[in-house]
Amino acid sequence: MKRSEINQIIREAEALLAENGFVLPPFLNWTPEEWAEKGAECAEIRDNQLGWDVTDFGCGDFDRVGLTAVTLRNGNQKHPEKYPKPYAEKYLVARENQHTPMHFHTCKMEDIINRGGGILVMKLYCADENDGLDEKRDVEIVCDGVRRVLPAGAVIELKKGESVTYTQRLYHEFWAKEGCGSVLIGEVSMCNDDDTDNHFLTAPGRFPAIEEDEKPYRLLCNEYPGR
């Protein structure tokens, strides 16, 4: 991805958050120059990958396969003795027909909430014993406290304010419905580890290679000095 593209994506995400009344914590507005002056006092931000995350999942086509995320708070699955916080919170932005590839989490349970914008669409499967798609087993989910049992591969939609709980080893793929605009998604979960806890069915990579065609507007969560 080009840095200019990432910069514009972050600006658009900031605008969508502001339109829906969400104010970000100060560290998410720090410039690269401000980050260069930060020391050990910001270790939790660096170590737990708080901040901006723009990815095309290694596919090279962000408009078709991609996601914008901003992590506000997070614990640490690898070092719970240092960072005992057992929860995380994110905002995600999905564009129309922009897919987050099919994946599950081994440890993390999460609630996905439509916080504003369009309609969020998702397809669901259980994982089988070989970490593939179980195309026969029913999917059991909870939507805003209501238990639902759906056939494998079911597609559901979340309108503003609605949510679903993803349990461990539940495959999910999601996107914003065509014609309804981008979706601002809230994620409330157990602590997040993008290095070890994500199992993608097919996705070449987690973080994009970046072509530096202009200065960064915001650093991504894997780019902080001192990491």
Image (cartoon, grey):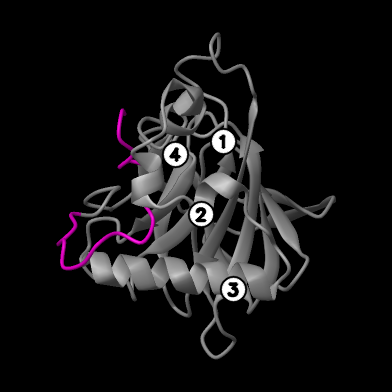
Amino acid bearing label 4: Asp
User: What's the distance in space between the residues labelled 3 and 1, CA to CA?
Assistant: 30 Å
Indicate which label's residue lies in the foreground, 1 or 4: 1
User: What's the distance in space between the residues labelled 2 and 4, CA to CA?
Assistant: 42 Å
Q: Which residue does the numbered mark 4 point to in the structure image? A: 128
Left or right, residue 180 beside residue 40:
right
Q: Which residue does the numbered mark 1 point to in the structure image? A: 168
Q: Secondary structure at mark 4?
A: loop
Q: Which residue does the numbered mark 3 point to in the structure image? A: 16
Q: Which residue does the numbered mark 2 point to in the structure image? A: 29
User: What's the distance in space between the residues labelled 1 and 4, CA to CA?
Assistant: 12 Å
Identify the residue at image location x=24%, y=62%: 215
Q: Quadrant of the N terminus?
A: bottom left
The span shown in magenta is: 209-227
Q: Secondary structure at mark 2?
A: helix
CB within 8 Å, label 1 to label 2: no
Local crowd size for mark 1, using a 10 Å CA cut-off: few (<14), some (14–19), many (≥20) = some
Q: Is residue 132 visible?
A: no
Magenta highlight on residue 211 = yes
Local crowd size for mark 4, using a 10 Å CA cut-off: few (<14), some (14–19), many (≥20) = some
